[in-house]
């Protein structure tokens, strides 16, 4: 693949005819709302419906155009929960958020098709699948997304996989195979967003290499989501201090804005990210 860095217009559509963000001038900010009990950075903090609503409002006012709701932690040490338990956490909060913010785009962070289906039926617009499993060339989540008519964010999750040879070449090959699997499952290109999977089975150095070379994935001609927020790749110089990790995340948000390597930034601290994007854009005005 050659370097062909450029922003891509998102042409995705909601199954509810809700307008989804399509900006190409600057990355779209996706605000993270964890309603799980054991998320690595804010587990239980937004479990109460009132606090979840307040946090959503804060992120939306800050500039988030998508709210990504997750009810199961995806940290490597997390204990998997059943679909029933996930839905018991997710549904009441999803319904309240949808009622309170009828126009905001909502994505559901889940790898279980049964959970994603019910969430979409209850007002969510986008599936964010952090596993994107393909078996015999077919992805069950993609088949569901195709049936429901909703977009899908497909993550390159390499946990329990072994790379042989050059890491980034393997990454690109793995992403291409996943994209083909999604297409084989009935999903159109307009409904696919690619996530290179920072933190999902990669080493610290591999995670930073993804950030540095993310623009090389532009030749896929698909929208790219970057999710580095508060991840352990920063631990060497932030420890477990989440405020410092927000600063580090904002730095990468600026780099992604400058290089035009990402169309969506998935973050916990929306205010810091928006400030970093706006600052970068002001500088870019003088460099064109």
Image (cartoon, helix red, strand yellow):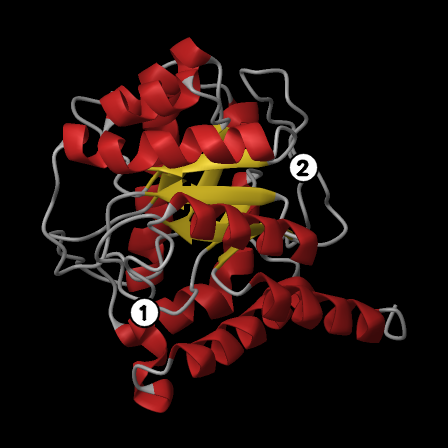
Point 88% across, 69% down: residue: 285
Taking 170 as reference, is 191 above or below it?
A: above
Residue closer to the observer: 208 or 114: 114
Q: What numbered label is drawn on residue 158?
A: none
Q: Give left or right: position of 129 versus 79.
A: right
Where, by quadrant of the figure, is residue 180 drawn? Answer: top left
Q: How many marks?
A: 2
Taking 187 as reference, is 2 above or below it?
A: below
Q: Give left or right: position of 180 versus 103.
A: left
Instruction: Return the residue at label 2.
Output: 21
Q: From the viewer's perspective, is the residue at label 1 or at label 2 nearer?
A: 2
Q: Secondary structure at mark 2?
A: loop
Instruction: Return the residue at label 1.
Output: 206
Find residue 27 and report its horizontal and vertical position in percent.
65, 53
Where, by quadrant of the figure, is residue 145 drawn? Answer: top left
Residue closer to the observer: 112 or 254: 112
Q: Secondary structure at mark 1?
A: helix
C-alpha span from label 1 to label 2: 30 Å
Point 14% across, 55% down: residue: 78
Point 46% across, 44% down: residue: 68
Find residue 43 and report its horizontal and vertical position in percent.
28, 59
Point 37% across, 25% down: residue: 119
Q: Is residue 201 visible?
A: yes
> Closer to the N terminus: mark 1 or mark 2?
2
Find residue 67 and report its horizontal and vertical position in percent.
52, 43
């Amino acid at each position: 693949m050659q370097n062909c860095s450029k922003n891509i217009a998102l042409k995705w559509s909601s199954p509810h005819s809700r307008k989804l963000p399509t900006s190409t001038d600057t990355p779209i900010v996706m605000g993270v709302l964890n309603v799980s009990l054991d998320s690595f950075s804010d587990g239980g903090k937004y479990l109460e419906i009132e606090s979840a609503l307040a946090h959503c409002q804060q992120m939306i006012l800050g500039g988030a155009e998508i709210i990504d709701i997750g009810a199961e932690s995806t940290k490597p040490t997390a204990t998997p929960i059943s679909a029933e338990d996930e839905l018991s956490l997710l549904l009441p909060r999803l319904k309240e958020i949808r009622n309170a913010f009828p126009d905001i785009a909502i994505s559901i962070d889940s790898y279980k098709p049964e959970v994603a289906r019910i969430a979409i039926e209850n007002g969510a617009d986008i599936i964010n699948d952090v596993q994107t499993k393909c078996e015999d060339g077919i992805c069950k989540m993609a088949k569901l997304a195709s049936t429901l008519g909703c977009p899908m964010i497909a993550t390159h999750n390499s946990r329990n996989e072994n790379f042989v040879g050059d890491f980034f070449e393997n990454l690109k090959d793995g992403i291409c195979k996943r994209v083909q699997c999604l297409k084989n499952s009935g999903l159109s290109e307009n409904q696919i967003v690619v996530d290179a999977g920072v933190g999902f089975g990669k080493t610290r150095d591999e995670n930073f290499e993804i950030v540095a070379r993310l623009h090389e994935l532009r030749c896929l001609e698909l929208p790219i989501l970057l999710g580095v927020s508060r991840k352990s790749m920063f631990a060497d110089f932030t420890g477990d201090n989440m405020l410092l990790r927000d600063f580090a995340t904002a730095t990468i948000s600026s780099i992604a804005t400058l290089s035009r390597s990402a169309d969506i930034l998935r973050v916990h601290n929306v205010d810091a990210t928006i400030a970093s994007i706006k600052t970068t854009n002001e500088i870019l005005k003088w460099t064109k």
